[in-house]
Image: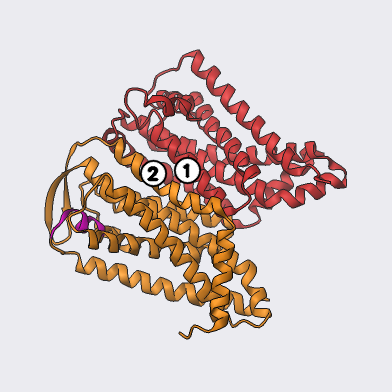
Chain colours: A orange, B red
Amino acid sequence: MIVNPRTLAATEMAFRDQRRRPLLLLLLVIVPAYTITYSIAITLATPRRIGLPGDQVVLTTMKELHGAVMAGNAIAFVAALCGVFVMQAALAGDRRLVIAGFRPGETVIARLIVLAAATILVVAVSMAVTAASFTPAAWSRFLAAALLIGLIYAALGALAGALLDKLAATYVMLFLALTDLGIVQNPMFGSGTPRWWAALLPGYGPGRTIVDGAFSPVFHAWSALAIGLGWAAALTVAVSWVLRRAVGTRA
Amino acid sequence: MSAALAPSFVREHLRTRLTLVLLVAIPVFFVLIFASVLGQFSSALGGSLASRAATAISAGWAAAFLSGALAFFQLVSSRGADRRLALAGLGAGRVALARIAAALSLAVVVSAVAYLTLWLRAGVAHPLHAALAILAFAAIYIGIGALIGVFVSGALEGSLLVVLVFSVDVFSGPAMTSGGGGLLASLTPTRKAADLLIAAGAGRGSPASDWVAVTAVAVGAVGVALAAFWFSARSRA
């Protein structure tokens, strides 16, 4: 991947476009900050036994659990919406750049950098506010899993943004994030361990890794992490291909 | 003229078949999936929702979120077309009436699907009460979505604001809080609609004051949405 002056120019223009939207920056901070802080604050410290990767069982509380999982939920929601609308903006504007002489790959890199930056901002805010109410057993693994959730859901949102209209993409991504990380992977519900079919959903790998990082001092979630990295890699390739094809072939 | 225009506005939103499929499928899945965990979630947050009441509130939330997002995108995406229609002789008032009729029609569809799913999943002790409460959730969020659309034109910012209002509403509502939930809870828009729906789901009636409050908020929200559509369609020249 060669970063040439036109790629840098496209990236700078894409960031300038975002800087003109102060409300967006504000909301990328406020939405995760509010949902994480408030939801943890109102949760009771009811005892709860959950299963961790590596067949471990740990006794914790609902409040601690909410602290462990709420950041992932908020990151998935916001990153997915960023993915939808960064992709929509790309489809609307980048075809003109290609007609003007840019290569599709140059505009694609610029959009992916903007999407990654928005995701990193949301993850940073989410981790900062989580730190005020919850301390995971291993910050490095907790942070890595949160970033993986953000990247996977940003990519899923981008795919939805390319394939569906705005309203349908918004509905699909919010429903998917809520169902996947909010319920199916969430150890606050059911037996405290996701059912076997939860592994089919994109949130399984990072969802299990974040719970492991939250409660286990020793890392056991190798297979879950591998599944999450596989999803992230496959989705990044898919988004790059879809975006490149979309801006390059339809003028 | 507004009556003739409203079906066209509905068709405009449903020209993508998938949107229609989602407007039907999401309330069904929302009620079915969330009903199984909302009782547990409520008790974790200090609420005291019985299982049937939890199922009922999930129908209201599904109708609320879908209608709010729909109203926001309807206002933002139609602004240019509505101004041209108003300038072409229809007038901003008639365009706004047609828009609100279209939004309410779609909200009725979403609410009916959510209600039917609720009825089939758990049964409804007070069918009319539950149906009206779910419709009130949808009407209130039409007002919220349209109001956001007046001030925010960016699709990402607007959808994040709808999510933020919805989150404040859900976490502060009577289903998820104990002891009233404080000042914020008393100011949330669907507070009384949630009280009605929880009571209907649990097989209890509701006091007349709750009905008056819900009617006032729902009618007020539709009025706000009408004003928002009118403001959006009027000429800036």
Range covered by the magenta-colored residues: A210-217
Locate residue A244, reporting x and y percent: 55, 77
Q: Quadrant of residue A163?
A: bottom right
Residue pictured at 45% horizontal, 35% vertical: B169
In the image as oriented, which residue stretches furthest toward the top?
Answer: B208
A144 on left or right of B231: left
Q: Position of residue B10 (x, y in %)?
A: 68, 46
**Is the residue B217 above or below the residue A146 in the image?**
above
Q: Which mark is residue B164?
A: 1
- What residue sits right under mark 2 in the picture? A35
The numbered mark at residue B172 is none
**Magenta highlight on residue A158:** no
Asked if residue B178 lies left or right of residue A155, the reply is: left
A85 displayed left or right of A54: right
State whether residue B26 appears in this view.
yes
Please, what is the dominant secondary structure of the magenta stretch? helix
Confirm or deny contact between disc 1 and disc 2 (CB under 8 A): yes
Which of the two residues, A22 or B33, is positioned nearer the viewer here? A22
Indicate the amino acid at tag 1.
Leu
Q: Given the image, what chain letter belongs to the residue carrying mark 1?
A: B
Above or below B168: residue A171: below
Question: Where is residue B4 drawn, in percent x and y?
Answer: 79, 41
Expressed as whole percent of the image width and height from the top left, the position of residue B34 reads: 37, 42
Q: Could you tell me which residue is drawn at 20 percent across and 68 percent down? A: A222
- Residue B48, compared with residue A35, is above or below; it is above
Q: Quadrant of the C terminus of chain A?
A: bottom right
Residue A213 in magenta stretch: yes
